[in-house]
Amino acid sequence: MIGIDEIAVRKGHSYRIVVSDLVRKRPIWFGGTDRSEASMAAFYAWLGRKKSGKIKLAMMDMWKRVLQRQLERRCKYAVKLRER
């Protein structure tokens, strides 16, 4: 189970992506250059194809449609929950 969210690193809409392990209750990845699909792809590249395929549940904000596409491509069997 993972949670995907963004964090502002400074004023002026400068964001990074934070991915957390919801079972262990700790962040596992902080990165990207913004909150784009390419930045989310960097997480899956870091995690690897085998581990990405083992993700069963992912929670994210509603706005992240672009991030959801990466999740659907890389974690085909994961349940996606969106926060409103």
Image: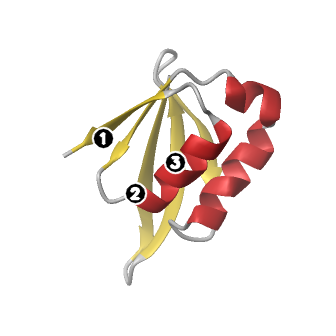
Residue 28's spot in the image, x, y percent? 62, 35
Q: How is the image coloured?
A: secondary structure
User: Comparing marks 1 and 3, which lies closer to the viewer?
Assistant: 1
Residue 65's spot in the image, x, y percent? 41, 58
Q: Quick one: which residue is furthest to the bottom in this view?
A: 12
The answer to whether marks 1 and 3 mark residues whose Cβ atoms lie closer than 8 Å is no
Rendered residue at 56%/42% (across/down): 72
Mark 1 or mark 3, earlier in chain: 3
Q: Which residue is mark 1?
A: 82
Mark 3 or mark 2, earlier in chain: 3
Q: Quick one: which residue is furthest to the top in this view?
A: 23
Dot 2 amino acid type: Lys
Q: Quick one: which residue is furthest to the left in this view?
A: 84
Q: Which labelled disc corresponds to residue 49? A: none
Q: Which labelled disc corresponds to residue 18? A: 3
Local SS, label 2: loop
